[in-house]
Image: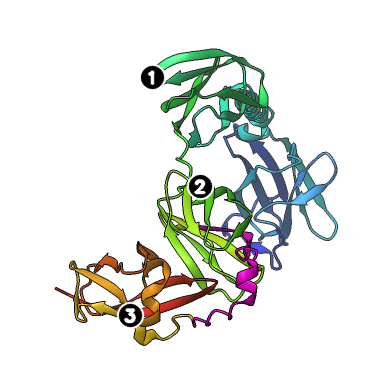
Amino acid sequence: MQVTQAVRLPAVPERNLPEKIAVSVSARAQRAGLFSTVVDVAVENHSPSPLICDIRGRTARREIEMQPGYVWIDPNTTGTLHVRVGTRFPSIHTVVVRLRDNVREYVAETAVEAPSAIRAFPFIAALVFLAAAAVLIAGILRPRIDALTMPSRVMTHDGVDVGYSANGVGEIRYEIQRDGVAIGDGTLPHGSGTLRFVTDRAPAQYRVVLTIAGALGKVSAQRSLTAVAPPAPPVVAQIRSLDAQPAVATSGTPIAVRYNASAQSGTVRLVDSRGTPWDAAAYNPKGVTIIAAPHVDAPRHFTIRLDVRKADSLAAAAIGVEVLPQPTPSASPRARVSAAAPFTPPPSAVGNVSTNPAYIVSGTYFSVTLRGAAAHVTGRATLETAAGTPLQSSPVAPGSDAKFIAPSVKRPATFYVMVSATRDRSGQLIVVPVVVHPS
């Protein structure tokens, strides 16, 4: 540090001046301390002019200014300067004191021991380096498990992949437990890898324990998983096959509808090309439903549709059938010359059909009566909901009414009686609305 203005020591006047002029300077270093060394500089100026005292420290390469820097020594003055040499690199090995004026210079030197901290620094640095190396080596060689992963839930009889990462001095061992009982163990290589095992077919709790033990310690980690039974297959409606025998039927003959389905309920319908149902029957768990082929005057294509339900799922399938008219018998010679038989119109008027009683209450019997021309038809009557689901079925014959039980309702509801009527060679579908009242 430089001092811009020299410091003056206080003058000590002397009454009796010596006959000879004497100037002296000396430097003496004290014992080195931990962080600094003190040098005592004694100066005497018994001359009539002031002197300047310059104190510098000498290192291996250069000289540097020391505190208190330049000091003015007044005439007839004696004193002692205390210079503190602190820690620095490179260290100061000699303190040089110069006492001079314009023509004279007095020099004093003293060797200085480096502070104990500087002299002990190599040993401290070596100890710190060795300690850091020991900590680093211990960290590398210390047993540790960096990762152990596996799923927490699997299905029974599934394969399980257990990922691990373990390092350090020691043997890596694993153990697989099922419901607290060991079912497998062994050793694993250091580093990262995968351990695989297969769960049993029965639900159970599994645990994987990973352990690494060595001269520097022992660590372990574990993970658990639950093996559960697979869920039951969903309950859905299915139709595996649908067949109609015969595929080409004659008017008025029965058609056996055979099917293989998984369902709780359903409907078998015979519909024409416009979607109008001509006959319907409920789903039979045995897989066979009989419906009647309607009367036709010419070959006509119909569709047999199967709709089934199971829980909240639905399934449907359809198959086509051909219905042919009844063959006309050969007329006898007498019949050829006889007058033509009068034409009988089909029972088309809804007014020809009525229910008995007219006011129908749920849970009671009611009948569907055919009057007029409709009283001479043959066929089948089906009670259906407004959505088209058949509920009950009853045959229809001349002089015989169709009988049903009114469904249970909480408020007035409309149902429909579908009559597939056949007379001679004519056929017709009669739809009768029925209102059922709550009891």
10 Å neighbourhood of mark 2: few (<14), some, or many (≥20)? many
Q: x%, y% of residue 132?
A: 63, 29
Residue numbers of the magenta segment:
315-344
Location of mark 1 (residue): 180
Looking at the image, do the residues carrying marks 3 and 1 touch, with CB atoms under 8 Å apart?
Answer: no
Number of numbered discs present? Answer: 3
Q: Is residue 67 left or right of residue 152?
A: right
Residue type indicated by callout 3 = Arg
Can you tell which of label 2 and label 1 is closer to the viewer?
2
Q: x%, y% of residue 364?
A: 18, 68
| Residues at marks 3 and 1, CA–CA distance in whole angstroms | 83 Å
Q: x%, y% of residue 37?
A: 62, 39
Location of mark 3 (residue): 371
| Depicted 5 relative to depicted 431: above or below | above
Of labels 3 and 2, earlier in sequence is 2
| Depicted 378 relative to depicted 121: above or below | below
Relative to the observer, which residue lies in front, 439 or 173? 439
